[in-house]
Image (cartoon, rainbow, N blue to C red):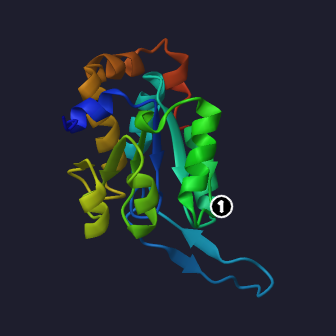
Amino acid sequence: MELTPEDRARRIKVLLYDVDGVLTNGDITIIPPQDPNSHPTEIKAFSAHDGMGIGIARLAGIKIGFVTKRNSRVVAIRARDLKIDHVYQGQANKTEALNKIIAAEGCTLEEVAYVGDDIIDLPVMRVVGFAIAPANARSQAKAAAHYITPNAGGQGAGRDAIDFILNARGILDQTVERYLDPNNAEAKSADIGSGNM
C-alpha cells in the first residue's frame, strides 16, 4: 500500500535542506572586491519564517541539516545562527553527506526528509522517506517529491515543510505554544544572529 505524505512525515527524525532555491529564492549576488587580492562578497536572502520554523522543529526533537553544492560564508553564518546540527557545503554528490548524517544520527532513510529544488537533489530525494520540493522547484524535483510546499524557496518553503511534518504528528500547535513559553530556554536562544552589528 502506498504511503501518504502524512504517513511519511510522521516518521521523520532528520530534516535536510538544500540551500539555494530552497532556503533562498535561488538568486546569488556576487559583489567584486575593490582589492583584487580579496574575496568577493556573496549575498543571499533567507526567510525569517524558515528560521522561526527551524527553532520550532528543534523543540519538537527534529535534527536539521544543510546539504549544498556551493561553499558560502553566508550559509555558514546562517547555519551558526540557527544552530544547525549538520552542515555540508561543497557537496557535488549529496548522497555522501546523507550517508554520513544517517550514520551520525543512527536513523534510517525512512526517517529522513529532504527538501530540494533541482536535479542535483534527485539522488537524495529518490531514496529518503519523505522528499519535499518547494513551489518554485524544477519539474524533475517536483516529480520526485512526495509533497510540494505552497510557498517558494526563500519565501517560507522551509517553514512549510516543518509545519507539514508537525501537523502530521499532531503536535504543531503544542510545539508553537512551547516556543512561546517565556521560560523556555531553547526558544529564547533560537535564531540569535548579529547581522551587521
What secondary structure is marked by label 1? helix
Q: Residue at x 77, y 79 (%)?
A: 38
Q: Dot 1 corresponds to which residue?
A: 73
Quarter occupied by residue 192: top right
Q: Residue furthest top?
A: 183
Residue 153 in picture, x, y percent from top left: 34, 58
Q: Residue furthest right?
A: 37
Quarter occupied by residue 116: bottom left
Residue 111, compared with residue 136, is above or below; it is above
Q: Is residue 86 visible?
A: no
Seen from the viewer's position, the closer of residues 189 and 15 is 15
Q: Residue at x 41, y 36 (%)?
A: 110
Q: Is residue 70 visible?
A: yes
Residue 85 in picture, x, y percent from top left: 60, 37
Residue 126, compared with residue 103, is above or below; it is below
Quarter occupied by residue 6: top left
